[in-house]
Amino acid sequence: MRDYSDIIDKERPVHDGDEFSYRHPKMAEQDRAKIFAPFAALKTVPGEELPEQ
């Protein structure tokens, strides 16, 4: 297993106007919600049963 001690305290990289940000533009929050919304259905409250279909 890898020891991440060399990177654990580093700041998150900021890509502002460089080649990376040009190739990978930041996704709009509305679009992110569309992608991850189906996963919200997988969350359940502990002890609660799933609804029957």
Image (cartoon, rainbow, N blue to C red):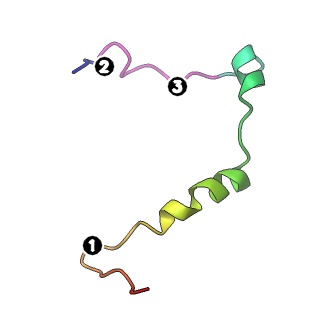
Residue 45 position, x and y percent, is 33, 73
Q: Name the residue located 78 percent from the left edge and 19 percent from the top edge.
A: 17
6 magenta-colored: yes
Residue identified by numbered label 1: 46
Crowdedness near tag 2: few (<14), some (14–19) or many (≥20) residues, C-alpha within 10 Å = few
Q: Which mark is drawn over residue 4? A: 2
Q: Is residue 41 above or below residue 35?
A: below
- Secondary structure under the numbered disc 2 in the rendered image: loop
Q: CA distance from mark 2 to mark 1?
A: 32 Å
The mark nearer the N terminus, 2 or 1, is 2
Residue 11 position, x and y percent, is 49, 22
The mark nearer the N terminus, 3 or 2, is 2
- Secondary structure under the numbered disc 3 in the rendered image: loop
Q: Which mark is drawn over residue 12? A: 3
User: Which numbered disc, 3 or 2, marks the residue closer to the eye?
Assistant: 2
Q: Name the residue located 21 percent from the left edge and 21 percent from the top edge.
A: 1
Q: Is residue 27 above or below residue 36?
A: above
Left or right: 27 with respect to 14? right
Magenta segment boundaries in residue numbering = 4-14
Residue 13 position, x and y percent, is 57, 21
For the residues labelled 1 and 3, say whether their Cβ atoms are less than 8 Å apart. no
